Image: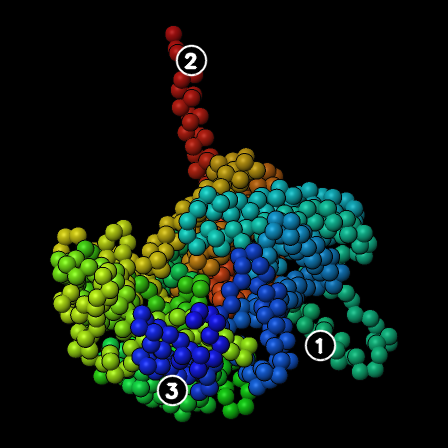
Amino acid sequence: RVLSDVTSLEALRDTVVGPNGLQLKYVATVSWAGPVVGFRNTIDGRKGVFVRILKNSDANTIETCAAVKAELERLRIDPAARDMDVFIFEDQSRDMLTAIDLLTTAGLNGGALALLILYVFVRRLRATLVVAVSVPISTLVGLIAMYFTGMSLNAVTLAAMIICLGMLVDNSIVVMENVLRYRELGYGPWESARLGANEVSLAITTATLTTGVVFFPVFYIDTGELSIYMRQFALPVTVALGASLIVSLTLIPLVLGRLTARTRERAGLTKPMPDAARLPAGAHVFRHVWERATGLLSRISVVGAYQRGLHWLLHRRLVAVAGLAVLIAVTAWIPFQRVGARTLPRVDVRMVQVNVSFDQTYDWSMAETVFDAIESVLDRQRIDLGIRNVHVSAGSSGGRIRAYLVEPEHSQGERTAHYTTEDVRNILEAQLPRLIPGGEVHIKLVETDTGGGSTVTLQMRGEDAALLKQYATRFVQLASDLPNVNDVMLDSERETDEIQLVVDEIMAARAGVSPFTIAQTVDFALRGTRLFYLKQDDKEVPVMAGFGEEDRRTVGDLDKVAVLSDSGDLVPLAGLVTRVKADTPRTIRRVDGRNVIAILVDVDTPNLSVVKTDLDELIGAFHLPAGYDIVEGQRLAQLEVNAENYTIALILAIILIYVVMGALFESYLLPLSILTSVPLAFVGVYWAMYLVDIPVDVISMIGGILMCGIVVNNGIVLVDHINRQRKLDESLASVVSACGDRFRPVMMTSLTTILACFPLALGSHVADVGLSSVGWTLIGGLTSGTALTLFVVPVFYTIVEDVRKWLLRYFASIAALFHRPVAE
């Protein structure tokens, strides 16, 4: 009978098999049976299916996730799925939407703070609103450029736009301040607008170009995470700043020129309060407070105090240089040595994973007992630890348990986020044993795809797999004693004992049996085989054939198996093979033809540079025979790549800044005095990172490169105005006067950028990327850079000018020697 025509169990039993015409029911037991249960996949104790959906590379994440959710809702309509519960454990679209909301809020807060500080300095609403116009216009131009270049709104590009918010008003502030200065000198509205914009056009153009050129070196760096993230920063920042430059030189003077109200006194800059007779009832108290506050402000001259301090310092330049050297030395000794480095910020994904591995002596019932015990430990602490769901995926050889924790923003009722993810890991690590009879338990934090997790890898390579395993095990024991290390384990499955059947080729040839036939027979005897599908009641049921359980329990049962020869005779298997017991790995990994064992090191510090130093010392002291070595994994190797790329990009950025300033100032000495602001800014960067305990990472490196282009802007504004004043008066008093004129715009531009970065620095991670480090980098760098630039740049300017004059006199004297007439 054709097997495909079998449509019932009785028909299958009556099927004729073999040459003797025997029916199947006489040589086999045919019955219904369920699949052998050897695994467990449950969610909160209920059976379930864990599905991971991956999008195409060109698909939109938010649209794809929305389509999946819509399909799940459509499935709920089906009566068969009415009682189905769906748990969404990972949703990248949710992270992205949350990132957009958080970054938008941070941007609005940062922009509001920037405009607030601008209004505090100017105390003129109309002038503040005029400057504020440059923000939406420049931002819109940047978004248009992103659209036409195919870029998307992500955490990095949004962070770039947020950082830009405080910088977009810088050019307009300088123009506005200079226009108002001319108004106060008695010029008309249009004349003030024309003269004020023309006078600072060179300075703000140079400042904008120096900010933009810092991104050029990154496009020539092809490897490393720094180049990837930096390119996302480059376009929005450069295009938006370019638009803000155009707006500041065209729209801002035009609008300011139309403001016909008389400029108020620079000391007060306040409107006179109306007469008491015109005030409404109850406003007299407000008038009194306002007049007292205005009078106090008029008596407090910050600019005057700054000029007096600068005058004192210019007459003691040696003291200034010595103090600056001490500050740099202390910074290099304390924060620079202790800040450390990492690749990317560690992102808390609120998930703890318990990995369990067993020896092959475990069967499913023994494994299930262990998993039940671990799951009960988690169930007893669901409320205390804030556990939302528990997913168990287990088998007889091992498995994992993932505890999904309640997120702080979703805390409600009894389940609240009392502990951080790392706290939960430490609590469970103290309660669960590391070793169990015939097995191991490892607890780890689940890492994100960005690589900012707590696990670093090493690779031990060599020829002999067994010898390699011995050395790797010994290295794991030594690495476990290192500081800042939670756990060290081998990323290899446990070796198994197996029985290998070695075919006696001579005996097999005599019996007319091929090795392939022997392998097929043994495979069928031990594992069985699937024959076909039985079609019944509009469904297909697979038909499995194999030896009964009682016929394959021991090795002696295998000796009873007979193999069919080419002549049709049955030959006992025991006469054809020799049994050998051996240990064998479940998987073999090779790189460049050599065996490789990965060593996983779980660390408890974000400072990977400290861990790398300790591991390098251990690797150097660990003796390996010739042909065996230990290499660092991607994350540790990426530290060096990022550091090299950062150094190259930083040096090239400074060189380009110098070239741009030299070309626009037509001097190769003046830019040197401005470049002194760069090391001053890095003093603040390292102190800020040290005080908030954040290591240097790729995101902060981007902030450091960007800061170089921003911090020189203040020096450019100062030096440009000093040059103009020195053409009329070369005394130190002219330097003090020029710096006093530029004190307000320098402070306003710096404070607007610094305050715009605060919401970003204080915010949490978004979209698997921690952005607080770039915020603190800019805050620390711009704070110290601005405070010290106001004093150090004028000091070095005068030093450079003195050196230039001395060189001119020196070379002039040499030239005079050659042109002196010879006496007769």
Question: What separation in Å lies between label 2 and label 1 (alpha carbons)?
Answer: 78 Å
Say whether residue 30 is visible. Answer: yes
Please state the horizontal and vertical placement of residue 732, each as a whole percent of the image. 52, 46
User: Which residue does the image show at 79% across and 46% down from the upper left?
Assistant: 190
Amino acid type, callout 1 = Val
Please state the horizontal and vertical placement of residue 21, each as a whole percent of the image. 34, 74
Taking the image as shown, residue 325 lies to the left or right of residue 7, namely left
Please state the horizontal and vertical placement of residue 653, each as a whole percent of the image. 47, 45
User: Which residue does the image show at 28% across and 65% down from the upper left?
Assistant: 520
Q: Which residue is mark 3?
A: 375
User: Label 3: how many residues lie within 10 Å, few (<14), some (14-19) or many (20+)?
Assistant: some
Q: Which residue is mark 1?
A: 289
User: Which residue does the image show at 24% across and 64% down from the upper left?
Assistant: 568
Task: Label 2: state its secondary structure.
Answer: loop
Residue 821's label in the rendered image is 2
Task: Report the mark closest to the observer, 3 or 1.
Answer: 3
Question: What separation in Å lies between label 3 and label 1 (alpha carbons)?
Answer: 66 Å
Say whether residue 732 is visible. Answer: no
Report the coloring of the rendering. Answer: rainbow
Closer to the camera in the image, 770 or 629: 629
Residue farthest to the right?
A: 277
User: Is 242 located above or below residue 588 in the figure?
Assistant: above
Task: Label 1: state its secondary structure.
Answer: helix
Taking the image as shown, residue 335 lies to the left or right of residue 46, namely left
